[in-house]
Image (cartoon, coloured by chain):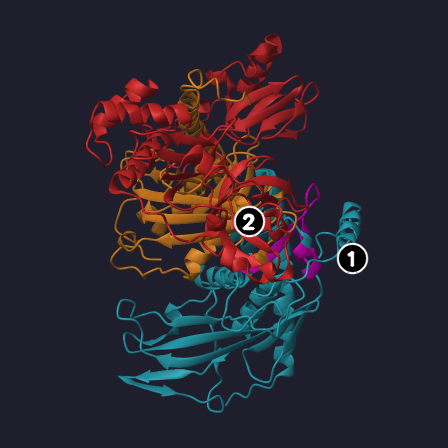
Chain colours: A orange, B cyan, C red
Amino acid sequence: MSSSRIEILNDGGLRHDARRPYELRSTSFQLNTHPTAEGSSTVTQGLTTVQVSIFGPREPRQRSQASHDKAIISVEVGVVPWAQGGGGVKRVRGDKRLQEIGASIRQTFEPVIMTHLYPRSEITINVQVLSADGGILPTSINATTLALISSGISILDYTTSISIGLYLKQPLLDLSHVEEQDLPNLVIASLPNSGKITLAQMETRLHVDRFEEMLSLGVEACQVLKTEMEDVVKSQTEKIVERMGVRSVVSSGMAVDE
Amino acid sequence: MVREIDPPSIQKDFLLAALAEGKRLDGRIPLQQRKIEFIFGEELGNVECRLGKTAVLAQVSASIVKPREDRPYEGFLMINSEIGPMASSVYENGRSSDSEVLITRLLEKSIRRTEAIDREALCILAGEKVWQLRLTLHFLSDSGNLLDCASMASMIALKHFRKPDVEVIGDEVIIHSPEERAPVPLAIHHTPLCLTFAYFENLPPILDPTHLEATLCEGTLTVTMNAQREICVLSKAGGTPLAAEDIMGVVRVGVDRVREMVKIMDDALEKDRENRVVEVR
Amino acid sequence: MFSVKTVALSSTQSFSDDIPATHRKHQAELDAMDLDEDEFGAGPSKRNIVTPGEVITSSKEYMRGHGTYVEEVNVVSSVTGTIERVNKLISVKPVRSKYVPEVGDLVIGRIVEVGPQRWRVDANGRQDAVLMLSSVNLPGGVQRRKIESDALKMREFLAEGDLLVAEVQAFFGDGAMSLHTRSLKYGKLRNGQLLSVPPQLIRRLKSHFHHIPPPCGPTGVDVILGLNGYVWVSNGTSQEKREGGEGFDSEGVYSDKNDDIPPEGRQAISTITNLIKLLAQEGIPLTDTLIEDSFNWVNQNQLPPGPLAPNETERMLAEVVGVDITA
């Protein structure tokens, strides 16, 4: 770990980007951002932007991989060259870190997607990181949830994710890249309705007693994110439903009532 | 990627029925590990660790290299951990599957990123010469839970290893052969060990899943801890969603278990030391 | 495409106060529903839109249908869409979804593989569809018997990449659809272009073959709206020629050659294609009358060929469809 010279928390209790410890970065959720995918979304949290497009359920590209009783899920993660930063190691497809992120996303969503409804098919989740400023995994998970919702694939619940750091004894939510470098960093993904955790990942040393507090804080933050997402999804859905009703009267002679 | 044949569903039903009664197919109770065994090789730093029928051989070697420009005081620790077809027919040479990547990444995180080895103590001459440790893992057989076994093998090999004593006079570095001077142990900060728990739907977690249990389970949780009650790495991806208390419960189990494991390791090392004649002149 | 930006959510130290008790909200909704049962499926009001994980009602009183699952005692939605109720059956109709085939559906597909006695067809479904050799009409008339040599010549009839229009005949045990083209209306497609739209925009209609008469091109334009979201726009032919009447070329059904299409005809095809794309982009369900009306609008306004300019698009949607996209 490299220690940068930023002040994680100043005397006024503000973080380096003037957030309070429990304040999330500004978010933007967009649905259907990919023209041909079955479902897609672009999620921005702070300066991290991730686009997810979902193809399928469709015929598996390798038919030998197909499962007779459920859909298989495959995840591809890519980081565009300009989001990789100047100094860092270039991440190409097949990089172990990216492969790990992909595996985490797949394992997070395998129990959430009702795969038994789509036997002998494949659901491909394409994650493209468009700009990276910390929290690639949580943002990718949030974007995947929205993309799944927009694709109409059956899922049990929203899955929202957040990173939690710890500075001295103060937990911080939604870490940026510089904070991620300096602090113990816990990423969790949870199902907001039950408050249960599907993914928990931590890479740095942390005392057991601190851990519990961070965990429950993360679960709360996931619920806040879910409320935000739900608002976007509902208002978007309303528009679509409205459009679907257009001119149904004019062509009523032809339309068969469903 | 070779796909393994799924176990028969009758076997799954049997295993689940037994688990519901708190029993496991090999007679263990849910939170019991398989028997841990260490076999020390001829050389220092060569240890085979066995966890039931899972076996991993760890070998540590050291060489002197030039440090990185930006970190002149730090030595290197390299971990080689490719899983070959020797462990199990599902692994292929040269191609890494998802599970293999997860194992190597977790090992890397638990040993390297948590600074288990004091890398500054590997410095001989700042900016000029540092020790490079190479930890090579050979996965001998996969009977489930390769990760825990590998982490134990790695840590005990590192503890077992002695690097040659060096003497610095001015700009000159003299490396003493083991015959001349007793080699010195590595400076180890703490002993992070992995513990893997497997989850089945609506059942309490089990520790140290066998291959069959790992294939049939809904998800696993791996926590790397040390004897100082610190969580070094936690990794739960997917599987049954858990409440925060469940995760804390597992962590608490881990605290005690890791202490025991460290003690087993230390005892084994102590015993080996008694049998081994290290000549000091 | 819509994009909704949310403002920064700033939670302070009193973090937990901000969190709405989702479960309490659901309980309130539930009570409201119990009072007024007819709320279900009464139209696109906000109440009827649910998102995954949202509790709809009690599973003790209602049965769960598509798009829902039961958790403990509740029927919970698993997709985003509108609640639909038929007596005691609650289902959620997703606003977007993959094409779900039904027997009798008209689909447009593309051959992906020629196999023993069968073709594999990509019909935009969950799995590839299957077209058996025994479910096609071969040149030489309806009554022709199939012989062994036909199986060897399958690629001469339909090769990989060929497009065809077919009907869903049945389902195999694994859920794959079986297609048939045993009607003169169905078969290989040529003289036009394919476009793909979200399948939910295509309603089940009495007929999916539409003919837009001249002045839309010298011979009009034919549009086939496949229920799987594939749409075929081609040079117009007369009713007789299409359905095996006078001038029907029974030998030419598997031809790979396009007819001579005059430039005006090609322009008409691309105009119709552009209009369909535009309507689909705005999420407006496609019908033959709508396509025809929008063409007439373009024709009346004597717009130049090519895609519509943004302001013309707005006007067209407002005047023909009655949708204000600027809102």
For the N terminus of chain A, the quadrant is bottom left
Task: Kindly check if marks 2 and 1 are in contact, taking CB atoms under 8 A apart as contact.
Answer: no
Q: Quadrant of the C terminus of chain A?
A: top right
Mark 1 chain: B
Q: Label 1: how many residues lie within 10 Å, few (<14), some (14-19) or many (20+)?
A: some
Q: Badge 2: how crowded within 10 Å, few (<14), some, or many (20+)? A: many
Amino acid identity at mark 1 = Leu
- Residue A51 is tagged as none
Residue B236 vs B267, above or below: the answer is above
> What residue is at 31 percent from the left and 48 percent from the top?
A178
x and y, in percent, of residue B256 in the image: 63, 53
Point out residue A49 in the picture as x, y percentages from the top left corner: 33, 43
Q: Residue at x 29, y 19 (%)?
A: C318
Q: Is residue B25 left or right of residue A129?
A: right
Classify residue A94 by image quadrant.
bottom left
Question: Looking at the picture, how far across and down is residue B142, in whole percent?
Answer: 64, 68
Which residue occupies the foreground of this view, A251 or B35? A251
Q: Nearer the viewer, residue A256 or B81?
A: A256
Boundaries of the magenta span: B192-215
Q: Secondary structure at mark 1?
A: loop
Q: Secondary structure at mark 2?
A: loop
Residue A176, percent from left and from top: 33, 44
The residue indicated by pointer 2 is: C128
